[in-house]
Image (cartoon, grey):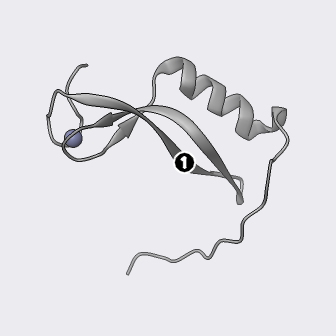
Amino acid sequence: MNNCDVCGNATFRRKQVEEVFNIEDHLVMVEGVPARGCDRCGDATFDRQTTESIRRMVHGVNRPTRHVNMDVLAFA
Ligand SMILES: [Zn+2]
């Protein structure tokens, strides 16, 4: 899988992104996640090792470094 899932572009750059996960109504944001970002549309994907690290983090292995307040909007 070498092309972007969203736009089909084939050039990427490394970048860091933040992702929000909903763990049984407890929201967890992970910052500074290393990702492969599409040069054209910016879509970010993670490799398997990164995905596995995130899974461990959001299930409580790592203590939070800070807290944020977040409003939740339903798409309408
Ligand atoms: Zn793209």
Identify the residue at image location x=23%, y=38%.
39
Q: Residue furthest bottom?
A: 76
Question: Quarter holding the C terminus?
Answer: bottom left
Element under disc 1: strand
Which kind of residue does numbered mark 1 sit on? Glu
- 64 horizontally vs 5: left or right: right
Residue 3 found in image quarter: top left
Q: Residue at x 32, y 30 (%)?
A: 13
The image quarter in which residue 45 lies: top left
Picture coordinates of residue 19 (x, y %)? Answer: 54, 48
Q: Is residue 67 above or below residue 35?
A: below
- Judge left or right: residue 50 versus residue 30: left
Position of residue 60 measured from the top left corner of the image (x, y, whole percent)? 82, 38
Q: Could you tell me which quadrant the N terminus lies in?
A: top left
Ligand 1 shown in quarter = top left
Where's residue 11, x and y in %? 19, 28
Closer to the camera, 56 or 9? 9
Residue 51 in the image: above or below residue 17? above
Quadrant of the image occupied by residue 36? top left
Q: Position of residue 29 (x, y in %)?
A: 65, 51
Which residue is identified by label 1? 18
- Identify whether 12 is placed above or below 7: above
Task: Specify whether 34 is left or right of 7.
Answer: right
x 65%, y 71%: residue:
70
